[in-house]
């Protein structure tokens, strides 16, 4: 047989084209040799042109009408994957049965080999890629997978089994292993360091699209996706997906999704997603964890930074279900399991929270019922709570009165209506009744002077809006035999770091004997009335007020004052006490008086004191009556607030600690 050569300018089909084709068959000592050269080859599945193709088979074996090239070579001068030198095995059984094997290709600094079997019109491709450089590979990948502006580095190995008919892919089974994954976007909002994982995808073409499954394992690395951060060193993440993709509608139906991030969270669910804009049309998610502490730190806390829920310590478990419609939560149901919540700022704590919690954007949401064993608000501990409420589309409504047991008594919340909890400015309104709260327990909780007696009263309406809690009407407290009426009460940022309180108060019919017995100030008998205007507390410390306390004009109670009470009042007005013990009046335990009056105002760091004007200057704090007569006259009208506080610290009050 003599040499045989064919040459043509081009060959074309709907899927491919070839230019500058030259086929040469030649006789060798062993038999037949082959050389095929193409100046350029294009295929719709390729990322670009392949140029300078030179395929050689030094030995072509012929069996009947079949030809085999067991040890061929391929040289490519230029391609999207760079120049190439590869080993080739060609098997031509007949025009409908062809097999091509390539080994030794270099792509993205890694090794690639494939085995293509064609049984017309069907084909099967086995592709292996080893340690491919993702940064070098990015030019061949869709922009959605690796955005051009990101810094990316990783090593990836791929095994793929693909099959189809003519130019149509019908089945795919792809496994990938990625190592040393590092990436970062320009803003630093998407970052990964030293990640590694495995991905397995199986897909089969159906009439309207594709059906398949995917399994993802991320077992190493730290990942940040604003505002979330996760470290997978000790807790690998497993994600399993199964679903259908309708290509004409670009619609993905996830029939089954399972995410496990041990031991933090277990999620299962299904979803319908429009891939055009990644919109979740509908989804059902079942979730559960016995490690709320890790779930809070990783998922919840980053979403609530700046709110009153961003500094909590949470333990316990939760199981529940979430329904999403058009990308928004439509329903939420959960079972709470032995949850402890502790606010690290010391504002509140809840212990052993258990029960059922539900929310819906529809009006007929299920009633939530949960119980708290114990807890505290600020330093005040409370007993068990049993709460029944209905979660409204944008708020909550208490379904039955809430009985809070604290300070030896009760606070009854008779109603609670809240709205705009999820959108807009939160607003709520409630009413309460205070029953038999122990002043002794209250003073102990706040480390105040030791008090005695009980606190009772009504809060007819409390209204919260724009981080301000306003008390409409008046708070009436029956205490010390009389009444304290508090008006214009307002608390700004009641659960914030620096709460502010504003109020005015009027006191009528108070019994000094009960007050002095409560405060152990020294015995005083008589009535007391007074007022406080413009009271302003910052972090529960006074910064401004105007006040006056005095004996009523028509007081019909006996007016008696003990020696120790006289000394203490003298100490407040002049900074010195105990002078009666050094005179003959020290032999009297009690004295009669005509009137008591104390005026005080505070503006920042300066306090002003006053009383009943004295003709010779100064002012009476106590104006005496009868014999032996005792007058308490003060001279100092202005005093630094810190100095006045020091005087209060030094007065002789049993069991009292002033700070």
Image (cartoon, grey):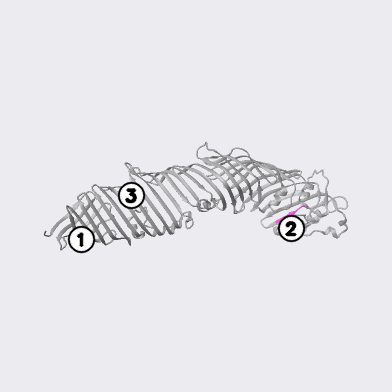
The residue lying toward the viewer, choosing from 356 and 98, is: 98
| Mark 2 or mark 1, earlier in chain | 1
If you read the primary sequence from the N terminus, does the residue marked by circle 1 or circle 3 appear first? 1
Q: Nearer the viewer, mark 2 or mark 1?
A: 1
Rendered image: mark on residue 172: 3
In this view, the residue in front, 380 or 623, is 380
In the rendered image, residue 610 lying in the magenta stretch gets the answer yes
**Residue range corresponding to the magenta coloring:** 607-611
Q: Residue furthest top?
A: 364
In the drawing, does residue 519 fall left or right of residue 334?
right
Q: Can you tell which of label 2 and label 3 is closer to the viewer? A: 3
Q: Is residue 515 left or right of residue 278?
A: right
Q: Position of residue 585 (x, y in %)?
A: 87, 56
Label 2, on which residue? 649
* Residue 362 x %, y %: 50, 38
Q: How many marks?
A: 3
**Tag shown at residue 56:** 1
């Amino acid at each position: 047989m003599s040499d045989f050569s064919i040459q043509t300018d081009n060959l074309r089909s709907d899927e491919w084209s070839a230019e500058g084709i030259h086929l040469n068959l030649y006789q060798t000592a062993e038999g037949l040799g082959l050389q095929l050269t193409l100046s350029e080859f294009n295929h719709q599945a390729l990322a670009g042109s392949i140029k300078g193709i030179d395929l050689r088979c030094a030995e072509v074996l012929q069996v009947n009408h079949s030809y085999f090239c067991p040890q061929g070579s391929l040289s490519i001068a230029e391609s999207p994957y760079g120049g190439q030198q590869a080993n080739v095995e060609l098997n031509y059984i007949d025009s409908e049965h062809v097999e091509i094997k390539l080994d030794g290709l270099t792509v993205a600094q890694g090794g690639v080999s494939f085995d293509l079997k064609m049984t017309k019109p069907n084909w099967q491709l086995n592709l292996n890629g080893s340690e491919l450089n993702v940064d070098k590979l990015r030019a061949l990948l869709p922009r959605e997978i690796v955005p051009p502006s990101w810094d990316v580095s990783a090593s990836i190995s791929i095994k793929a089994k693909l099959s189809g008919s003519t130019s149509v892919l019908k089945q795919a089974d792809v496994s990938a292993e990625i190592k040393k994954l590092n990436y970062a976007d320009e803003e630093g909002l998407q970052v990964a360091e030293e990640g590694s994982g495995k991905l397995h995808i199986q897909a089969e073409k159906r009439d309207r699209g594709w059906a398949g499954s995917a399994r993802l394992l991320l077992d190493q690395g730290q990942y940040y996706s604003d505002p979330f951060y996760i470290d997978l060193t000790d807790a690998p993440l497993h994600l399993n997906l199964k679903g259908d993709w309708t290509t004409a509608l670009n619609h993905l139906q996830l029939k089954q999704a399972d995410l496990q991030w041990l031991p933090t969270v277990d999620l299962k669910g299904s979803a319908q997603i429009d891939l055009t804009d990644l919109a979740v049309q509908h989804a059902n998610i079942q979730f559960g964890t016995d490690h709320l502490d890790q779930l809070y730190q990783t998922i919840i806390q980053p979403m609530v930074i700046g709110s009153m829920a961003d500094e909590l310590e949470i333990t316990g478990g939760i199981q529940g279900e979430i329904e999403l419609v058009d990308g928004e939560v439509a329903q939420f149901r959960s079972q709470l399991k032995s949850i402890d919540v502790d606010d690290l700022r010391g504002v509140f704590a809840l212990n052993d929270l258990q029960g059922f919690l539900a929310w819906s954007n529809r009006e007929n949401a299920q009633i939530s019922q949960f119980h708290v064993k114990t807890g505290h608000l600020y330093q005040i501990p409370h007993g068990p709570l049993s709460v029944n409420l209905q979660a409204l589309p944008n708020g909550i409504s208490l379904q039955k009165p809430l009985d809070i047991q604290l300070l030896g008594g009760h606070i009854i919340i008779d109603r609670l209506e809240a709205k705009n909890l999820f959108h807009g400015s939160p607003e709520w309104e409630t009413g309460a009744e205070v029953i038999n709260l122990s002043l002794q327990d209250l003073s102990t909780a706040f480390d105040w002077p030791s008090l005695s007696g009980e606190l009772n009263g009504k809060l007819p309406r409390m209204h919260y809006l724009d981080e301000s809690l306003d008390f409409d009407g008046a708070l009436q407290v029956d205490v010390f035999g009389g009444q304290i009426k508090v008006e214009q009460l307002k608390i700004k940022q009641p659960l914030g770091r620096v709460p502010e309180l504003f109020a005015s108060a009027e006191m009528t019919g108070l019994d000094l004997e009960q007050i002095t017995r409560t405060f152990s100030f020294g015995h005083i008998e008589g009535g007391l009335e007074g007022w406080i205007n413009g009271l302003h507390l910052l972090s529960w410390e006074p910064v401004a007020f105007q006040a006056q306390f005095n004996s009523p004009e028509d007081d019909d109670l006996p007016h008696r004052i003990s020696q120790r009470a006289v000394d203490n009042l003298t100490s407040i007005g002049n900074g010195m006490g105990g002078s009666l013990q050094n005179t003959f009046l020290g032999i009297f335990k009690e004295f009669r008086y005509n009137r008591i009056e104390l005026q005080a105002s505070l503006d920042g760091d300066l306090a002003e004191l006053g009383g009943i004007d004295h003709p010779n200057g100064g002012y009476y704090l106590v104006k005496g009556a009868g014999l032996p007569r005792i007058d308490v006259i003060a001279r100092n009208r202005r005093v630094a607030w810190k100095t006045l506080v020091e005087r209060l610290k030094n007065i002789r009050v049993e069991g009292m600690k002033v700070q």
